[in-house]
Image (cartoon, coloured by chain):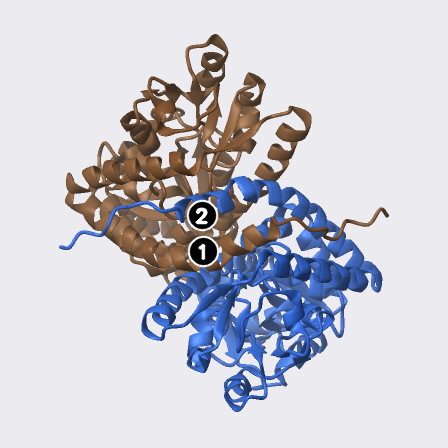
Chain colours: A brown, B blue
């Protein structure tokens, strides 16, 4: 109802009406009846899948509001440094941000769990946990400590495990490995004896080429191809145990959020819901193509970790995650909720999507596209 | 822009303004500035996951339009019989419908492929094919033959393979099997020698109890539990090779669709995109719970088909699908597009989601929720 009045006022074109509307709202800039919001991403502007996901969100909100909300998208660093995006949203310097929850663990440790954990939930399970397993309320609680409203805004899907200059046959092979692997995965690799380093995306390729790294993880074929990691000649390992379904976040300054009408809130809810599967399926489609290009044109060698390596990594992940959960009460509650959902999700996954995909991969002759 | 004017007119409350707006639109009923649209589902009103998915779509459109679009949802049969929903939309008797594409194969054969095929794409892959693999344009072409605009509006995810009164160890065990299995799966089972019958959902349980069936497929634990199929004592087989990622459709009369403003079109696009993963994740969450209840409280016995049975079913599926595709040019084009996308999706699935879910299911001790 408020929005209809707002639009009516805008259409009447009266400067006085516009001023009244503006003065009753604590936050966003309103000019000529249009709410102008500023969103910074943690990604470079238009970064494939991630930056373009932020653009898609902004465009969808604009269309749904009939142009009454304009979100200007800034790349990481354009207003504040990428990893200070949340601070800028918290203080109201900008209206909203787009990134990944684990970037905020220094401020609110539970965001590292909200992002998804090693050996945890897939992208679809993360969404189901958010909507039907209590995840949204916990995430809102965590983000409220940063004066923000939380939305799940997409996923890369299961990532790869990264590139390795040698075969990885057991947990022993991690010992001394100079490994670019950030986040919880990095902590697990460190627990296995790796010398974990962090490097920005742009420095990974040169470090691989110079011999200063033995292994490096970035994202998946789509992004790894863009970074040129396939030119290393290294082995490309799977599965991405460390990031099975990592989520992206859209976070909105709470004063801005509270100034929204119910319709505007519904627009952000639906736009993020729409963006969620749009982003995930864009990664899916592009990873399909990039993997084919890597294998068929660049002779990239794929390797699967041994079961022994995977179970060892799972148990190290358990120790790392249990330790982090014990250190922070909200992390404990988030992890408990996620573990409860995981325990119910696995039996269903094992007879549904997982069992089907294994059956589909059996050896048989299926239909071929016609020549025509 | 049109919609803003429309809302402005509504807010002004002038009957004359309303009449002008109404007379300029060929279709939907407009009263007091609100567009009232009628949508019939093929499902019973409020049917779990499917009927509630239609309700969610209607509610989302209403919220996004600030109440300017009201969709009244009718259950299957309330206006016309369920499987005549598309005819009622085509003729303009109702504005839109909600169901599954394969229900319309009698009118447009390619809808059976658009729905998803045995051993085909998962739910996420179906969405990726629609958005990035050419699926949407082909579906729009097929539905335009029924005077309708097509939207993908959700998925059940991978289904189960159904309930069997005996063990299924090879393709031979299908011979003479009195089997409730509709659609393409039924055609494949018939090719394997089964005596395939179709029964409405409500008649399946009694037929299982009376001994007039040897096997029956409905959906997944969430819906099968509601139907009481777990009380049969039969074996519950997986994976659901016949429906790996079946999609739901929302179809809108083309005259109504063309009467929409760009903003209204964006609202339907985003509402369906939001509903897509909402519906799928609701099935996910409820299947998790229903499967646990079946196994833990009702001692339901799960069985996986043998590899030999699955590869046999895959090759029979190929023959059935190739035959259908040859009989209809648009089916051929849809199937070619889907096969091309499938050929690229499988290698990625095998190293991403599928490989991860297999790794997650290995034997190790993971974290447990705290007692507190």
Q: Position of residue A316 (x, y in %)?
A: 28, 35
Q: Nearer the viewer, residue A122 or A268?
A: A122
User: What residue sits 36% from the left and 48% below the top?
Assistant: A151
Give the residue furthest to the top: A210
Write down the residue under mark 1.
Answer: A350
Marks 1 and 2 in Cβ contact (< 8 Å): yes
User: What residue sits 78% from the left and 49% below the top?
Assistant: A369
Residue A85, above or below B135: above
Q: Where on the picture, by quarter, is residue B152?
A: bottom right
Residue A347, above or below A210: below
User: What residue sits 28% from the left and 46% below the top?
Assistant: B365
The kind of secondary structure element at disc 1 is helix
Q: Nearer the viewer, residue B164 or B291?
A: B164
Q: Position of residue A321 (x, y in %)?
A: 25, 39
Q: Is residue B25 visible?
A: no
Q: Nearer the viewer, residue B226 or B319?
A: B319
How far apart, in angstroms, are the residues tagged by discs 1 and 2? 7 Å
- Which chain is disc 1 placed on? A
Q: Residues within 10 Å of mark 1 (few under 14, many from 20)?
A: some
Q: How many marks?
A: 2
B172 lies left or right of B277: right
Residue A117, above or below B261: above
User: Quick one: quadrant of the C terminus of chain B?
Assistant: bottom left
B228 lies left or right of A227: left
User: What residue sits 67% from the left and 46% below the top?
Assistant: B341
- Which chain is disc 2 placed on? B
A362 lies left or right of B370: right
Write down the residue under mark 2.
Answer: B357
Tell if the residue under mark 1 belongs to the same chain as the one under mark 2: no
The kind of secondary structure element at disc 2 is helix
């Amino acid at each position: 109802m408020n929005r209809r009045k707002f639009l009516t006022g805008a259409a009447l074109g009266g400067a006085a009406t516009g001023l009244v509307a503006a003065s009753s709202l604590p936050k966003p800039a309103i000019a000529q009846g249009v709410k102008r919001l500023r969103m910074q991403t943690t990604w470079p502007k238009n970064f494939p899948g991630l930056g373009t996901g932020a653009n898609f969100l902004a465009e969808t909100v604009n269309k749904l509001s009939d142009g009454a909300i304009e979100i200007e998208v800034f790349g990481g660093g354009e207003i504040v440094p990428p990893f200070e995006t949340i601070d800028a949203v918290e203080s109201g310097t900008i209206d909203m941000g787009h990134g990944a929850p684990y970037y905020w663990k220094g401020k609110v440790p539970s965001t590292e769990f909200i992002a998804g954990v090693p050996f945890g939930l897939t992208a679809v399970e993360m969404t189901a946990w958010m909507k039907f397993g209590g995840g949204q309320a916990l995430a809102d609680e965590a983000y409220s400590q940063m004066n923000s409203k939380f939305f799940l805004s997409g996923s890369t899907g299961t990532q790869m495990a990264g590139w390795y200059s040698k075969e990885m046959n057991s947990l022993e092979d991690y010992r001394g490995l100079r490994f670019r692997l950030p986040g919880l995965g990095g902590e697990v690799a460190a627990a296995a004896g790796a010398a974990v380093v962090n490097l920005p995306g742009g420095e990974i390729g040169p470090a691989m080429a110079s011999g200063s790294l033995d292994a490096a993880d970035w994202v998946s074929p789509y992004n790894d191809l863009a970074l040129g990691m396939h030119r290393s000649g290294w082995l490309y390992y799977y599965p991405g145990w460390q990031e099975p379904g990592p989520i992206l976040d859209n976070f909105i300054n709470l004063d801005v959020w509270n100034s929204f009408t119910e319709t505007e809130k519904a627009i952000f809810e639906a736009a993020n819901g729409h963006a969620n599967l749009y982003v995930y399926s864009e990664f899916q489609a592009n990873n399909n193509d990039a993997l084919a290009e890597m294998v068929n044109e660049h002779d990239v060698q794929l390797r699967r970790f041994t079961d022994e390596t995977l179970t060892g990594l799972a148990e190290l992940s358990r120790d790392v995650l249990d330790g982090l959960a014990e250190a922070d009460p909200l992390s404990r509650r988030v992890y408990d909720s996620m573990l409860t959902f995981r325990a119910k999700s696995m039996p269903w996954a094992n007879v549904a999507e997982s069992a089907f995909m294994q059956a589909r991969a059996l050896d048989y002759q299926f239909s071929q596209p016609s020549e025509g």
